[in-house]
Image (cartoon, rainbow, N blue to C red):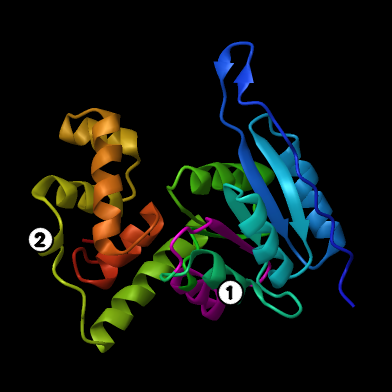
Amino acid sequence: MTDPIAARTVLTSDLGATGPTATIRVVVADDQALVRTGLSTMLDTEPDITVVGQAADGATAVELARSLRPDVVCMDIRMPGTDGITATRELCGPDVEDPVPVLILTTFDVDEYLFGALEAGASGFLLKDAEPAVLVDAVRSVAAGQGMLANALTKRVLREVVTRRRTQPVTAARATELLTPRELDILLLLAQGMSNEEIAATLVVEVSTVKSHLARAMPKLGVRSRLQAVVWAYQNGIVELGG
């Protein structure tokens, strides 16, 4: 029997004394009650984050996410019944028309889970032993559509996607056929790990311009986050690891 499910809906006002504020609404899914409660409590202490629901298994996580429409689902991988990878695919897989962003949180540093999560559409992957501040930043990053991949995993992921590209025929169209020259410039800088602000400074444009180009480019590539865009760029030979 799984742990009891704790679910709650929080109604908050977007208008404060100083004007509109953005509250990031989060669902936490983990089969261990202690972990689930600890993560929820930690996130709830942040002024811009509210945990609106908790789930002890993947099926409940999907149900809550579809009904509550959170900005981020913090998803464990190994859960009874519907696992985190399957739940992620149901929430933000390639065929999902109205996806809910998922941040994978796991104790298992295993490539099988990592690539399974990314292929299922996850916007981020973080190990549970990360510092609290890193987790909070990851939630904010995923909510903003930027994605998150633990630094210790980044190079390994990119090496793997390059290897897979070399052993399998590249089927995606060339980026130059999909993107405008400016969109391609931004993708290349993004693949170097630059932030929106750094890209804007390099290209001498406004940050809002960078965001607009990225918003138009990602649907063309069939991706939904900056992280997935970077993986796409390496996977399709647009950039080389270390190049």
Give the x, y percent position of residue 48: 63, 32
Q: Quadrant of residue 165?
A: bottom left
In the picture, measured across the screen, residue 178 lies left or right of residue 51, that is: left
> Is residue 241 visible to us here?
no
Disc number placed over residue 56 in the picture, else none: none
Q: Residue at x 32, y 33 (%)?
A: 197
Q: CA distance from mark 1 to mark 2?
A: 32 Å
In the picture, measured across the screen, residue 77 lies left or right of residue 125, that is: right
Q: Residue at x 51, y 49 (%)?
A: 142
Residue 127 within the segment the image draws in magenta: no
In the picture, measured across the screen, residue 12 lies left or right of residue 152, that is: right
The kind of residue tagged 2 is Thr
Secondary structure of the residue carrying tag 1 is: helix
In the picture, measured across the screen, residue 89 lies left or right of residue 145, that is: right
- Pick whichever of labels 1 and 2 is earlier in the sequence: 1
Give the x, y percent position of residue 70: 61, 48
In the depicted structure, whether residue 198 falls above or below residue 79: above
Query: How many neighbours does mark 2 have within 10 angstroms: few (below 14), some (14-19), or many (20 or more)?
Result: few
Q: Quadrant of the C terminus?
A: bottom left
In the depicted structure, whether residue 20 falls above or below residue 84: above
Q: Which residue is mark 2?
A: 176
Give the x, y percent position of residue 184: 16, 52
In the depicted structure, whether residue 156 falls above or below residue 1: above
Secondary structure of the residue carrying tag 2 is: helix
Q: Which residue is mark 1?
A: 85
The kind of residue tagged 1 is Ile
Q: Quadrant of residue 127?
A: bottom right
Along the line of sight, the residue nearer the viewer: 235 or 80: 80
* Residue segment shown in magenta: 96-119
Residue 114 within the segment the image draws in magenta: yes
